Image (tube, helix red, strand yellow):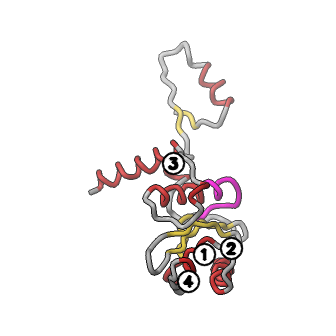
Amino acid sequence: MFTYVGKETKFITKLFNNTSLKIVFTTHNTRGKLLSKQRNHNLNKFDKCEVYQLICSDCNKNYIGQIVSPFHVRFQEHFRDYKYANKSKFAQHLLDNKHSIGPTENIMNVIHTTSKGKMLDTMEKFYIYKKTRINNQINDKCTVKPNVVFETLILEDTDRAHVIL
């Protein structure tokens, strides 16, 4: 068994083509690990970024976002947008529907921790997609497009849930 690391692995395994040995590839970067809801505690505190959700305390609809600044700072930005009727989709939802804003600990949750960059952006899109699919999100619905990979992951997750039950 070889851990696949790129073209070098393929070169080495080709050497075994004319033998009776069967070559199997493995990787530690499984989609289960990459998209796990478990928080990654190995990140340096300065590299730590999170995908979070805000839950409307009146209707339970969700807003998904990402934090690259401290948690309380991001909540204060949403609160300020609510108080002064600014641009936040979450604040706009609360104001348009005459809903109240709850305390941070009741309405704001971290749903994934990773490092800054493409993975953070992808995780945010995945959770927005997941909430859009069940019509339970406040984010801009126009930005969510059909995604076969996300669908597969959601269906695979659902299939595993049925096996556990």
Quick check: marks 3 and 1 in contact, CB under 8 Å?
Answer: no
Is the residue marked by circle 2 packed among few (<14), some (14-19), or many (20+) residues within 10 Å? few
Give the residues in magenta.
113-122
Structural distance between the alpha carbons of marks 1 and 4: 17 Å
Mark 1: secondary structure: helix
Is the residue marked by circle 1 packed among few (<14), some (14-19), or many (20+) residues within 10 Å? some
Q: Would you place residue 146 above or below residue 1 in this image?
A: below
Q: Residue at x 44, y 76 (%)?
A: 59
Q: Amino acid at mark 4?
A: Thr
Of the numbered discs 1 and 4, the one sitting upstream in the chain is 1
Structural distance between the alpha carbons of marks 4 and 3: 29 Å
* 123 or 27: nearer the viewer: 123
- Label 4 sits on residue: 104
Q: Residue at x 52, y 55 (%)?
A: 129
Of the numbered discs 1 and 2, the one sitting upstream in the chain is 2
Quick check: marks 4 and 3 in contact, CB under 8 Å?
Answer: no
Mark 3: secondary structure: helix
Q: Amino acid at mark 3?
A: Phe
**Quadrant in the picture for the C terminus:** bottom left
State which mark lies toward you, 1 or 4. 1
Q: Residue at x 64, y 66 (%)?
A: 66
Of the numbered discs 2 and 4, the one sitting upstream in the chain is 2
Label number found at residue 92: 1
Structural distance between the alpha carbons of marks 3 and 2: 28 Å
Q: Amino acid at mark 1?
A: Gln
Structural distance between the alpha carbons of marks 1 and 2: 7 Å
Mark 4: secondary structure: helix
Label number found at residue 150: 3
Residue 162, horizontal then vertical, whole percent: 30, 52
